[in-house]
Amino acid sequence: MNRRSDIWLAYFMILPVVAAVLAFVIGPTWDVITLSLTQFVMGQARGFGTLVNFKALLADPVFPVVLKNTAIWILGGTVACVLTGLCVGLFLAIDSKLTGALRALILLPWVLPDVVTAMAWKWMLHGQVGIIGDSFSRMGVTDGPISFLGNPDMVMWILVLILVWRKMPLVALILCAAIRAVPAEQIEASRMDGANAFHRLRYVILPNIAFSLTAVTVISMIWITAEFTLPWVTTGGGPANASQIMATYIYQQSFQFFNWGVGSAMSVVNLVFLMLVVGLYLYINRRSWAAGGNA
Amino acid sequence: MGSVSLSNIRKSYGAVEVLHGINLDVADGEFTVLVGPSGCGKSTLLRSLAGLETISSGEITIDGKVVNKLHPKHRDIAMVFQNYALYPHMNVAENMGFSLKLAKVPRAEIEAKVRKAAEILDLTEMLGRKPAQLSGGQRQRVAMGRAIVRNPAVFLFDEPLSNLDAKLRVQMRSEIKELHQRLGTTIVYVTHDQIEAMTMADRIVVMKAGHVEQIGAPLELYDNPANVFVAGFIGSPAMNFLHATAKGGQCVLADGTALGPLPVPVAEGRSFTLGIRPEHFIIDQAAAPALVSLVEPTGAEIQFTAHLGGASVLVTTRDRITARVGDPIGLRVEPGRMHAFDAKTGQRIEG
């Protein structure tokens, strides 16, 4: 074996992965980009190399609403998931029989299919027959049942709540594992130094789990950006586009209204956003590695 | 001022009792070392004193004040951990000043105290560095600095040198001892290394399986061990133990060899455990016959392993003896250097 044939062997060995990436990632992405630059009339391609789809998107009165809803969905969802996940993770990190059992049980929402989750919440939150609205009015919290998903001012936030219920457990488990990996001696040293529970969290635990915390934040952001089934099955973007987000609007434009051009233009916008998030993640990762995991 | 008093300390994990009623008094300014094999309860005792563990019963007093129920931060103590337990995201100065920062001490005062401690420990150049950029010995000094800055009544050390290499350990040993002489603060120090205990302590507490075996000054333990365990644990190379019987005022070994007069009166015909330190043998061709089975020169002295009276004994000598493996030599014991222990209980037989 000489060096040259080693190189060919190496290329041969990574060929399947390269082929798969080309076929399933690069190919469709290329298609979407070309589609977004192609004008469609009645589902027929009418000329390539135009920005007409992007112009149509900007002129669409629903698009600003979609952007605002997507911001609530992605930013609100990420912040809520990570904050509640951190609180639950801190609780689960305590050593006891109860938390040991809860650590296993908490994954239940995470293993349910999206559609089951969405349908269950949809019925529980239903304006007339939902158990939640009914309980509230029976307890006298509200005068009558509230239509949680029918109220345009409320629906986006309710969706975020469902999202937290579904995505938070894994965040909590990851952070719980990170918190449990904080050296016990550092915690003890800080107790000797006079730190109370808040000081221990602020000065010892958070700096030690900073790496996991940023990673889990960015990953949650990517998950939530890519999440489609949950909002689509729960509200279908309604009422009157009040819960329309990028993912659902792209689906609606492309596969219900067959506006391929506008749909793919939006996909490109979405892709650019995701690439920025991933880029940020890689940047933080690299920097932490360079600092020996101590950054 | 920092006197410590432990009275009848018991600690159980469930049904398992690990400390069986420990009594100990540490005078102000004293350097006390708790020493014993792994699992003897010495670290548990120290952690109970620190307030990191709760005790099942007994009373801990620091400077005349019962601290059983007090949080660690209210006990006026500082602790140096085995793995240093430095905060990796803070630099040396921040690590050392952390307790003062939590106590809301003014920034200028923190800086002055940290600078002073850094000077004592020769860390002035390192104040801006992170722990990951320091060597093991430097990290150890930062951990001590963190304790010094607080000016506590008592310092606690939990096996602080066990993560260092042999050379650095010897150096840090003298540094800690010098530090103690300089600051004069009470120190309670835990180690499994009897040499550390011997070299550093004013007083040693030898522990085994949750009991205190003996308390005393280093040389007192070395010269008058209370039982076989202390005799074997303190001193390196370890004391030789031989089965002997009292016959006509002589120590008679298993094969009938008479090794010399009894160190203490023992009833005629009673068998006991005879303890002899390796350096207390004298090589004398006219004395009890032995066969050399191993020769190990260390430079300062020569260690012989020899068969004596049916047992194997270790002999060290500073003389340049040229005996080789298989050579016969004669052995006797320096007068007054034999120890007699009860064969069953292992307790010292008193005269």
Image (cartoon, rainbow, N blue to C red):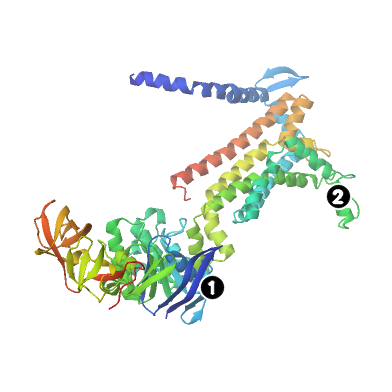
Q: Is residue B74 above or below residue B13?
A: below
Q: Quadrant of residue B3?
A: bottom left
User: Residue at the location (78% across, 19% down)?
Assistant: A42
Q: Is residue A108 left or right of residue A183?
A: right
User: Residue at the location (71% across, 25% down)?
Assistant: A261
State whether residue A61 appears in this view.
no
- Residue located beneath label 2 in the image: A133
Picture coordinates of residue B36, whole percent (x, y): 37, 64
**Residue type at tag 1:** Ser
Picture coordinates of residue B261, whole percent (x, y): 18, 72
Q: Quarter of the image containing the N terminus of chain B?
A: bottom left
Q: Is residue B11 left or right of residue B305?
A: right
- Residue located beneath label 1 in the image: B57
Picture coordinates of residue A258, whole percent (x, y): 77, 24
Q: Quadrant of residue A124?
A: top right
Judged from the image, the secondary structure of the residue bearing numbered disc 1 is strand
State whether residue B57 appears in this view.
yes
**Residue found farthest to the bottom:** B64
Picture coordinates of residue B147, whole percent (x, y): 42, 69
**Residue type at tag 2:** Gly
In the depicted view, which residue is nearer to us: A52 or B213?
Answer: B213
In the depicted view, which residue is nearer to us: A177 or A122?
Answer: A177
Q: Please report contact status of discs 1 and 2: CB closer than 8 Å, yes or no.
A: no
Query: To which chain does the residue with label 2 belong?
Result: A
In the depicted view, which residue is nearer to us: B208 or B105?
Answer: B208
* Label 1 vs label 2, nearer the camera: 1
Q: CA distance from mark 1 to mark 2?
A: 55 Å
Q: Is residue A228 above or below residue A95?
A: above
Crowd around label 1: few <14 · some 14–19 · many ≥20 (10 Å): some
Query: To which chain does the residue with label 1 belong?
Result: B
In the depicted view, which residue is nearer to us: B328 or A259?
Answer: B328
